[in-house]
Amino acid sequence: MFDSSPPNLPVEPAPKASPTGAPVQGGINQTGIKEPEDIFADIKEPELEQTKAAMPMQSTPTVKGFPWKVVFGIGIPLVVVGLGVSGWYVYTSYQSATKTVKPPTNGAVAPSSVPVTAMPDNTQAIPNPIKQPDETQLAASQAATALMQAQAAKGYQEGTTSTLSEATSTQVQELTATATSEVTSPPVAPPNIPLPESVSPTAPTELSPGLDSDQDGLTNSEEALLGTDPNKADSDGDGFADGSEVKSGYDPAKKNGKLIDSQYLKKETVSTLDVLIPTIWERKPGLGGSVQILTGTPAVITIDLQPYATQQTLLDWVVAQNMGANAQDFSSDKTASGIDVVYSKDRMTAWLLAGNTVYKFHYNTNSALTKDFGMIFEYIMVKQAQTVLP
């Protein structure tokens, strides 16, 4: 009997939907249980709808990435400003470096400004602080020096203590006058300067023979020493020229005579070697055991002794003794008695090997311009040298 409700009972209104579309639940929020009627529903609902409509919808904030826009916005202006400052600094430095400086002139005329730069201007000529010597004065000085050196060499060769002070003022003035007529006074001679000990004045490499009137190979000076006629090519009339006989070991003043028996020659013994020299020549002891043969003229012939203790040939030994020389500078030969001999190219020096001793013959002309005793030196003294007989 209670299956249907009485018609006179009040009917409960249906619940209104919420603005979001979800049903509004009661405080208990249980299904099948009737909640008390809200008598203020009609009054509160419109106000609630207006409040919700007036409130703005707040969205959930999102997390953004790295702020590149901020970085670029601040960094780029800073870079531009830095470049501007750097450019201004470089410009001001360049302007200060290229400024001109006016040097003090001290009364002299000087350029208005001199550029100051980092690199020198190679196009500007640098004045030479050393004054160039006068050519005429230099020539006179060289001439005077040559005279003094020649006189010093002459005194040295004669074994004296000749010095540069021997040059007279008259000789100096004559040389300076020939060098130039513009020099008013000759240069002052330097103090005495001896020649170095290592320098040995020698004759020129090319010497012409002395005067030979009859063209027989012997100079007039040699013919006077050997007793022959300077105006007759064959003095003894044997059909052979005087020079040819000397080269062959014969006496040009006597038919069929030998040089070793000539009355115009004498024998001098030097250690273990016999040497022929003209009778009027003199022997004199030299330095270090050497022997000097005085000719009566400025020319002097010296004989030096050197030990020989090697298995080398004489030519190789001579080459080794002369620094910078080679075998082509010498020629090998033998004396009349078979002794090995080596000649220099100018035939002014000869080395003889006798036993364990080398005899060095040297012809020193002592500034003479001619070779007056070449035949006697080469073909009588050297060629006819022989070891001492027991």
Image (spheres, helix red, strand yellow):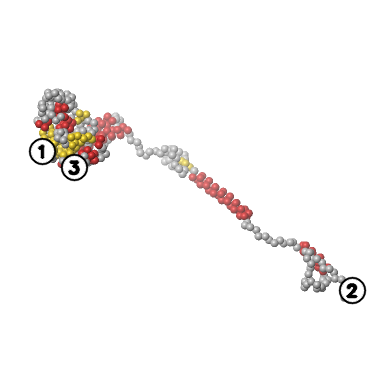
| Amino acid on which disc 2 is placed | Pro
Of the residues under marks 1 and 2, which one precedes in the sequence?
2
Q: Name the residue under label 3.
A: 308
Picture coordinates of residue 363, whole percent (x, y): 19, 34
How packed is label 3: few (under 14 Cα within 10 Å), some, or many (20 or more)?
some
Label 2 to label 3, Cα distance in Å? 172 Å
Q: In which quarter of the image is the C terminus?
A: top left
Secondary structure category for the residue under label 3: loop
Which sits in the foreground, 327 or 269? Answer: 327
Secondary structure category for the residue under label 1: loop
Q: Quadrant of the N terminus?
A: bottom right
Q: Mark 1 points at which residue?
A: 389
Circles 1 and 2: CB atoms closer than 8 Å: no
Picture coordinates of residue 145, whole percent (x, y): 26, 35
Which sits in the foreground, 381 or 50? Answer: 381
| Amino acid on which disc 3 is placed | Tyr
Label 1 to label 3, Cα distance in Å? 21 Å
| Amino acid on which disc 1 is placed | Leu
Secondary structure category for the residue under label 2: loop
- Residue reaching furthest to the right: 8
Q: Residue 283: tell me if it is visible.
A: no
Which sits in the foreground, 30 or 224? Answer: 30
How packed is label 2: few (under 14 Cα within 10 Å), some, or many (20 or more)?
few
Q: Name the residue under label 2.
A: 6
Tally the marks: 3
Residue 157 as seen in the image, left or right of residue 99: left
Picture coordinates of residue 236, whole percent (x, y): 11, 25
